């Protein structure tokens, strides 16, 4: 839903909705986790986990599921390839465990297969959680806020520069000329429309670059950020690679391809 389609709200109404949503999320989340924790604790004891340590089993399973949910929400395409299977696996085991708790008579042991699943959850989901933690910590974050008028870059990408106006101004007497009047035979050039960083130009250029070259596991947003850091901030390829967690050879390939695209189109780089 776009911003224009949303119901107009006063500031106090918007804050009330945010507070209500937060309270509902906390309440429902607590109820769901508490019920699931009790059920999974019972399943762990039926799987021959000592009763004084059975609470660790739902902690490991639910903790890995929550971490995977966070990764799916904030991660990119590459991160989601890992977190989606972890999330699906954790939910599947939790749902089946809750169903077994409801179906089996009290005190009855789990089937052999599910006792094996109970025993495998701790090492598998422990390793997955540590790996997911390293992925989230190593993710690159680059906010793309638009620049203010006072902090414009020293160079800008200029598109379709119009030809200067070569019309000759009419002659006037020297005595009537003023310092602010244009001199005779002086050509006046119209200002060229410049597209500065943050106006979306690099997004379009990134799409064209990806149409020319093939780079593995690199999204259009990554290419756009490479172009911004290279053209706007004049950063070296190695420095861009370190900041974006990308190989400097890949950065150079992207920059070279963008230069080729700019040469083939009526676009110039003005200092």
Image (spheres, rainbow, N blue to C red):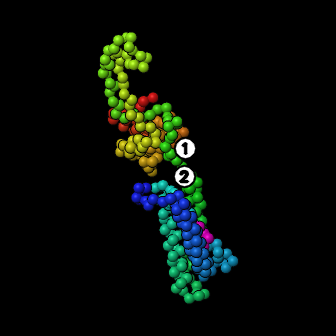
Please state if 125 lies on the left or on the right of 195 as rendered. right
Q: Quadrant of residue 257?
A: top left
Residue for point 43% across, 55% down: 3
The number of numbered badges drawn on the structure is 2
* Nearer to us in this view, 162 or 45: 162
Please state if 219 lies on the left or on the right of 59 as rendered. left
Inspect the magenta stretch and tell me whether residue 30 lies in it.
no
Q: Quadrant of residue 67?
A: bottom right
Q: Which mark is residue 243?
A: 1
Residue for point 58% across, 75% down: 31
Inspect the magenta stretch and tell me whether residue 61 lies in it.
yes
Q: Is residue 141 above or below residue 60?
A: above
Q: Is residue 3 above or below residue 169?
A: below
Residue assigned mark 2: 139
Extent of the magenta region: 58-63
Q: Residue furthest top?
A: 174
């Amino acid at each position: 839903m776009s911003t224009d389609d949303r119901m107009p709200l006063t500031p106090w109404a918007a804050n009330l909705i945010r507070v209500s949503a937060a309270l509902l999320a906390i309440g429902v989340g607590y109820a769901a986790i508490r019920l699931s924790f009790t059920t999974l604790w019972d399943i762990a004891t039926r799987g021959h986990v000592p009763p004084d340590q059975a609470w660790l089993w739902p902690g490991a399973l639910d903790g890995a599921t929550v971490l995977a949910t966070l990764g799916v929400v904030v991660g990119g395409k590459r991160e989601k390839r890992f977190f989606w299977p972890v999330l699906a696996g954790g939910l599947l085991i939790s749902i089946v465990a809750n169903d077994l708790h409801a179906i089996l008579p009290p005190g009855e042991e789990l089937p052999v297969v599910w006792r094996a699943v109970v025993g495998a959850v701790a090492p598998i989901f422990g390793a997955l959680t540590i790996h997911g933690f390293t992925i989230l910590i190593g993710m690159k974050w680059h906010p793309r806020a638009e620049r203010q008028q006072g902090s414009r870059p020293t160079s800008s990408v200029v598109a379709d520069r119009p030809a200067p106006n070569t019309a000759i101004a009419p002659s006037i007497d020297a005595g009537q000329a003023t310092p602010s009047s244009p001199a005779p035979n002086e050509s006046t050039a119209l200002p060229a429309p410049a597209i500065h960083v943050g106006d979306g130009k690099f997004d379009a250029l990134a799409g064209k670059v990806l149409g020319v070259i093939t780079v593995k596991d690199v999204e259009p947003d990554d290419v756009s950020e490479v172009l911004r850091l290279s053209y706007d901030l004049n950063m070296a390829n190695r420095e861009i690679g370190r900041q974006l967690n990308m190989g400097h050879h890949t950065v150079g390939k992207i920059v070279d391809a963008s230069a080729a695209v700019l040469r083939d189109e009526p676009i110039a780089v003005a200092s």
